[in-house]
Every structure is written in structure tokens, then in C-alpha cells.
Image (tube, grey):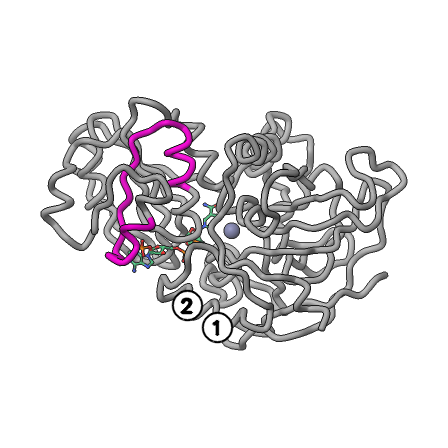
Amino acid sequence: MPNAKAYSAASATSPLASSTIVRRDLTPDDIQIEILYCGICHSDLHQARNEWKDVFATVYPCVPGHEIVGRVAKVGSAVTKFKVGDLAAVGCMVDSDGTCPDCKEGLEQFCPNFTLTYNSPDKHLGGVTYGGYSESIVVREKFALKVPANLDLAGVAPLLCAGITTYSPMRHWGVGPGKKVGIVGLGGLGHMGVKFAHALGAHTVVFTTSPGKKEDALRLGADEVVISKNPEEMQRHLFSFDFILDAVSAEHDVNAYLQLLKRDGHMVLVGAPEKPLQVAAFNLLFGRKSLSGSPIGGLKETQEMLDFCGEKGITSDIELIPIQKVNEAYERLLKSDVKYRFVIDMASLKG
Ligand code: NAP
Ligand code: ZN
């Protein structure tokens, strides 16, 4: 079985460091991808540090990374979708049972037996799966997506998680012309949310704790920007939103946003903070408002999102870093200091 260079965390408190992992030999429907770029999602940090221990305890060593783009280096004997040299992308899932009602509807993200790209039981090798902070990955062709040829490849990587995670709930809840849509938190997910809400034709309002991001928010497609720490600015939007997407990574007050929904308005959490959030019942009762959550997206919708990005020329705004700077990037992520997604240039792993 082939070895691959990677970066892994040995424990919740150790920095990520260079390591070697094993990738499986190709089965007939597998492809091997030489990874060119991998985005850094805040979920990578949550999991490398075992912050989701109550739901998804991290098994070490942990190789994060689920925003993967690269070139197909090998194909199994039954592969039909890809040939050697093609571009291919992998997001948060690498397998599912294919037989449950969710899989049959193309909603693999709800399959009770799905395999996440990292930190999920590995059916082939035992132990857990290893993600994209690595020079290569072996994956079923079904779980690899086609990359539009016209887009900047490094800027495509974040679409595989930040992109689909914001696109999917907007499509599900009908974001479009005539709707007033709020995006809370202008980070990796949030900035993709702004691009999609704008591209789908909604009136888009960004809520940020960082006054310095105001100009960027407008450039990314926001019609208005609210500094959420300023109560008067918040008050101006009471009872006015159809839909609010909350992409905040840390503890914060969701009630402040529930109050901004109009009757029957809807707020969806895509952010996954470590600690539970408190909801005041009256903020839902008055106005028959609803609050829900949404995880990533299925394969069909992920391909639809990539194709939509190809048509509209949408990519992520990125800061390209060598893998040796990954620990520094994690610290900056915690300070909301990224515009707006770190992407690892995997060529740096070869040196
Ligand atoms: P990120 O780039 O770090 O962005 C998070 C943003 O949240 C920050 O830029 C900041 O925006 C805001 N924020 C941070 N701390 C805050 C605080 N204490 N109070 C209020 N706002 C704060 O993270 P990301 O990669 O976009 O991920 C966001 C969250 O989504 C993470 O929890 C991640 O695990 C989760 N996630 C979920 C899914 C899913 O399937 N649902 C998929 C991927 C990621 P401002 O500076 O604008 O305030
Ligand atoms: Zn992610």
C-alpha cells in the first residue's frame, strides 16, 4: 500500500506536524488523487483539538482536511467518470451505504452509515480516515466531484465545504429575489454565504463583529453591513428578515438574531460552536419563527453548486499558505484574522 506525506495532530494539545500515512491500494471503483490544494475549515481546528468530543471524539493521529482539489493520478479498473490527468475534488464525505432512504434521495450527508473524509472509521484499513492535509488521497469515484475548468483551482477548494454548506440551506429554504437574507459571521463559510445570497438575487445583509470587514462585505456582494456589537444598528432590522444563516464558530447570542426574523422567518445554524447555545422560547413563539441546522450537502447538490460557481465565476477569496504555516493559520482563525479562507498549497509538502 502506498505511503503518503501528511500533516497530523498527535493529540488535542499538540501542534500539527509532518508525518507519513498509508493510503489503500485502489479497488476497481477508486481513484487516487494527487492533492494540489486543501482549504482549512474551522471544523479542522475543532476536531484537531477535540472540541467536538461529545459528538465526534477525535481519534489520533488526526489528519484534517475536507476541501480537496487535485489531479487524478491513478484510476481503478471499473472507473468511468475520471481518467488520469483530470481535475477532481473531494469534500467532507468519502463513502455512504448507498441503500438507505437518504442515499437514495441523493442526500448522503444524512446517511447513518456515511464515512467522513477524516476522523471516521476506515472500512478498508481499520483505524480512522485521513483527510486532505496530505499529498494524495484514494476515494471512490462516486465521492469525487468534477471541477469546472474555468475557475482558479486554489479558490475552488473551499467550495467543497464552505461552499456547499452555505449553498445547500439557501436552496432548501428558497433564498432568491424578494427575500431579505442575513449572514452572521464573515469567515470562510460566511463569505461564501454572501456570494451565494447575492448571486441568488436576495437582499443580503452581513452581520459582523469586525468593523474592519465592512468594505470587504460590500465588495463580496452585501447590500448592507451591520456591526453586530452595536445595539442601535441591530434594532433597525427588527422583524425584517426572511432567512438568516448563522456561520459563527464560537459561543454567541442567537436570540439577538431570532428577534430580527419576520413572521414565519427562518434561521439556520451552520456554525458548530463547541458549547450549547441558549434559545429564549419567546423569540420563537412570537412570530412562529423557526431555528434549525444544516450539515454540508449531498453529492448531487455539491456538483450542482460547483457547476453554478463555474457559470457565475464564483470562487473563495483565499490566502494561500505553505503547509508549514498551518499552526499559525489556526491561531489566526481563532482571531477571525483570515480573508477569507486559508488554503494550503500542497506543493509545499514535497520539499
Ligand atoms: P471561520 O472562518 O473561523 O469564521 C467564523 C466567523 O465567526 C469569524 O470570522 C467571525 O466573523 C465570527 N466569530 C468568531 N468568533 C466569534 C464570536 N466569539 N462571536 C461572534 N462571532 C464570532 O470559520 P468557518 O470555517 O467559516 O466555520 C464556521 C463554523 O461552521 C465552525 O464552527 C465550523 O466548524 C462550522 N462548519 C459547519 C459545517 C456544517 O456542515 N454545518 C461545515 C463547515 C463548517 P466576524 O469577524 O465577521 O464576526
Ligand atoms: Zn468544513
Q: What's the residue type where badge 2 is placed?
A: Arg
Residue named by callout 2:
332
Q: Amino acid at mark 1?
A: Glu
Q: Residue furthest left?
A: 232
Label disc, if present, on residue 328 of the rendered structure: 1
Q: Which percent across, then down, holds residue 23?
A: 78, 59
Task: Find out whether the residues at labels 2 and 1 contact each other: C-beta distance under 8 Å.
Answer: yes
- Please state the horizontal and vertical placement of residue 212, each as a whole percent of the image: 27, 58
Quarter occupied by residue 287: top left
Q: Is residue 196 magenta?
A: yes
Residue at (39%, 49%) from the top-left corner?
271
Say left or right for 280 vs 73: left
* 317, above or below 342, in the image: above
Please say whether residue 227 is one of the residues in the magenta stretch: no
Q: Residue at x 22, y 39 (%)?
A: 258
Give the CA distance from mark 2 to mark 1: 6 Å
